[in-house]
Image (tube, coloured by chain):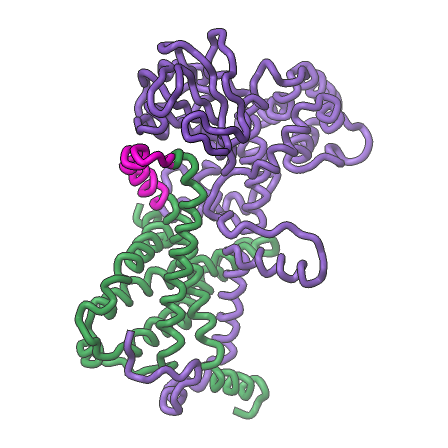
Amino acid sequence: MDDPLSRLDAALARSRFAWIGLGQLALIGLGLHLAADHLDDQVYAALSALVERLAGPLETVGLAPASPDDLLEPSAWIALALELLTLLHAFNSLTLTPLAPTLSPRAYRDALSVHALVLPLYWAPTALAGAWVVGMSVEDALAPFAPTPARWLGVITSVLIAWRLGLSGLARVIGGLSAPKSRLQGILWAPLLLTFAALAAWYGLPWRGVLS
Amino acid sequence: MSRRTPPKGLKPSPKAAKAGPARGGLTDLFLVVLTVFGVMTRTPVGGVVTWAVDVARGVETERPSLIATFTAGPSARLLAELEAIFVQPEALAGALGSAQGAPGDGFPEPYRTAARIALAKSDGPADDTLRAEVAALPAEERAIAALDRLYQGDVEEALEVYAVGAEPRERAIRRARQVGEDEPSRYATHRAFLPDAQARAARAAVDGTMGLAKALTLTWPIAAPHRVSSRYGYRVHPVLKTRKLHNGVDLSAPIGTPVLAAQAGEVEKAAQDPLNGKFIIVNHGHGVRSSYCHLDALHVEKGDEVTAGQVIADSGNTGRSTGPHLHFTLRVGRDAVDPERFRPELRPEG
């Protein structure tokens, strides 16, 4: 424990509470952004259907309904707003919980609610998708110098980040759960969080290609 | 979201702090830095930060779009720049035929790219042959034709390889394959997996050039004699009496006049509503879409593939319309553009 590197390592470990949350949040942000890149297509489809349905009533009151191709940009802004809202939820989940709370099945059972059920379902795929994105960034940055090692470094980075930031973040938010006022707590957030989770799992993880 | 500990900001309780691992600080900090690096390179945050720094330093710079990553296709501004080059024969000939200096220098991307690829892949007498062949073509077809000849039809690949390089393209294809995409080698399928800066270059080169090439080679949707009853631009709406952007052109035509697809593409929508009446939207790829409104009869369905000049409908007077006409819009990227700018008989000769 005497060498300077070990001392630095220990000092950084002691101050982890001050900066680890930034990495955990950035990781979720990357996964959310990847999912949001597909969410805007879904929003566009929903808006088109809505406009088609509302065109008649709007016409009767003298309002011009939007043309279908005017909906592309609003769809993108709605996806961005939902992404930021979900990121805010992740920020809220992370910042007000202890750094390394005690995890126990009993504590989780006590805290069981819609929110407690949705949290791991949303956090895990989003963090994994984010880890994959960071791995890609590392590979892209190193590939011009050494393509093959860059690929492996990308994979190793993804695994390390999923473990050190993704898993620790998940443990942190799960451990931070408390007994809910109602078992239905979090039901309003659930559709949004699960939509992002599904998009991140479907488009953000390489399992489909591996299976095929 | 209630929790076992009351809000205390970022600082944990002494017990919680002790519960954290006492080693691995360097590793974790390194991973946090990498993750933040990922955010800077894979989301619009990096662009916003760069813009903010430029503004703080007093450097004039364009504000980045926060939604750029959600919308495919080139911007109208880029296309206007490209169009200026495409329809100027002498500028084009200079780009392709420059004997001095680097080929294509002095021309904006992605046109310079096209010229450079054309010349880089040809040398000696072949170069002259290529130039002679290309020079004989209409101006707007020259670069695409030169690339087409050199790459056996895969112009997209040629432009993308030039803009981003072969190796990053291969990586993007591999990632698209990993997530189970059906046609990973198609640019539209794997472009999301390109690194951020290279994705921007590819968007300009591939979507910009190909999108403009599509717009510049469109078929006018009505072949029969007709007049333009309302042009693109701001006007007072004839029914609502409000000032509004007329996002296309109205072509006066008797009910039943054949309506032709402006370009090859896929029918994205064939439907009816009270505003547009019966309408069709065709997606031509590379951010180019055309739509045809107030139709009388539709001859295609959603999902159909159409060819340029194919009869897709009969014009009519359905929806909110004051007389028989076709409302034709052309959208390049996010913006509706004036279709008459791309009308074949109005373009300058090459």
State the residue at coordinates (62%, 59%): B50
- B269 sits to left or right of A152: left
Q: Position of residue A172 (x, y in %)?
A: 34, 76
Q: Position of residue A160 (x, y in %)?
A: 43, 68
State the residue at coordinates (37%, 62%): A86
Q: Work out which quarter of the rendered image holds the C terminus of chain A and state it.
A: top left
Chain appearing in purple on the rendered image? B
Q: Position of residue B92 (x, y in %)?
A: 71, 25
Is the residue B46 above or below the residue A169 in the image?
above
Extent of the magenta region = A42-65
Which residue is most to the top? B225
Query: In this orientation, does residue A139 appear?
Result: no
Q: Position of residue A69 (x, y in %)?
A: 42, 35
Which residue is most to the right? B100
Image quadrant where residue A106 sits: bottom left
- In the rendered picture, chain A carries what hue? green
Magenta stretch: residue A58 in it? yes
